[in-house]
Image (cartoon, grey):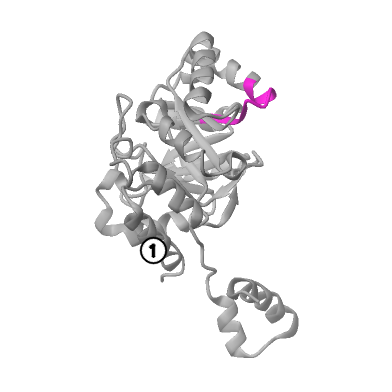
Amino acid sequence: MRRRDFIKWTSVAVGALGLPSFARELAAEPEKKYASDVVTLGKTGIKTSRLAMGTGTFGYNHQSVQSRMDHGSGLPELLRAAFDHGINFWDSADQYGTHPDLKETLKYVPRDKVVILTKTEATTADEMKSDLDRFRKEIGTDYIDILLLHLMTDANWPEEKQGAMEVLEKARQDKIVRAHGVSCHTLEALQAASKSDWVQVDLARINPAQIHMDADVPTVKGILKRMHDDGKGIVGMKIFGAGQLVDRRDESLRFVLGLDYVDAFTIGQEGEEQMLDLLKRIPAASVAG
């Protein structure tokens, strides 16, 4: 029996049978969480690894740190290495320029074994239709698991993006997209997302130091919990504060792992060494006092 399963069994047994103190102590131990744990994003039905492979470190103008990684030790090789360790969630965007890297990786990784999230700046229906066709061609897939409206800052984004939203909902019904949502970059945009029934997945900035976040930590936590209670899938980002919390990685991981309403989180990595380091840190942080 795996240790995690034994702890769960012991918790039940303690209550039912009144086992000795050593069993009570074991049952009281927090359960480790792993990067490769399979989680479900809200009520979308989409199951994925807890950790997503971020591909947009300093991503803009169709480029990112990951899109510029050296061939032979580049992003496709990193994604394949992560997949071998059970990490099957890929976080991309049109602005990152990493769609071709996903396509290259899909030559070696079964499409139905990975969850692909990407993002669009489309506003109108025509722009969204064009992006849907282009994105699928660039990635080399017939469907996209999660497609988000990228970088929402205006409180009125549900009205401004209505054309794109209607196309995405039709695409979901046609099984071209499995779920749709937004990434938010202001409190007003996040509040609008929390009220929108259209939002199925929200990509939200969250860390213990309020760095590059939409508001103070208690405010953001409260909104994300309400969103999750409403059935929205929550994916955390800026876990290390856009690099400003790299010296506080364990604290930052412990913080996000303690938020039961954050289903998964994305972290940009620049090589296999960083990926393997995260795989070790996450379970250790999940049970740290």
Where residue 154 appears, x then y in whole percent?
Answer: 40, 21
Where residue 176 appears, x then y in whole percent?
Answer: 63, 25
Where residue 175 appears, x then y in whole percent?
Answer: 67, 27
Q: Quick one: quadrant of the N terminus?
A: bottom right
Residue name at image x 52 percent, y 48 percent: 88
Q: Amino acid at mark 1?
A: Arg
- Write down the residue under mark 1: 281
In the image, taking residue 14 as reference, residue 213 lies left or right, namely left
Where residue 203 appears, x then y in whole percent?
Answer: 46, 37
Residue name at image x 55 percent, y 57 percent: 37
Q: Nearer the viewer, residue 263 or 91?
A: 91
Place residue 247 in its image quadrant: bottom left
In the image, taking residue 264 as reference, residue 62 lies left or right, namely left
Residue 218 visible in image: no
Question: Magenta stretch?
Answer: 171-181
153 magenta-colored? no
Residue name at image x 33 percent, y 35 percent: 67
Q: Quick one: quadrant of the C terminus?
A: bottom left
Residue 252 drawn above or below residue 89? below
Place residue 201 in its image quadrant: top right
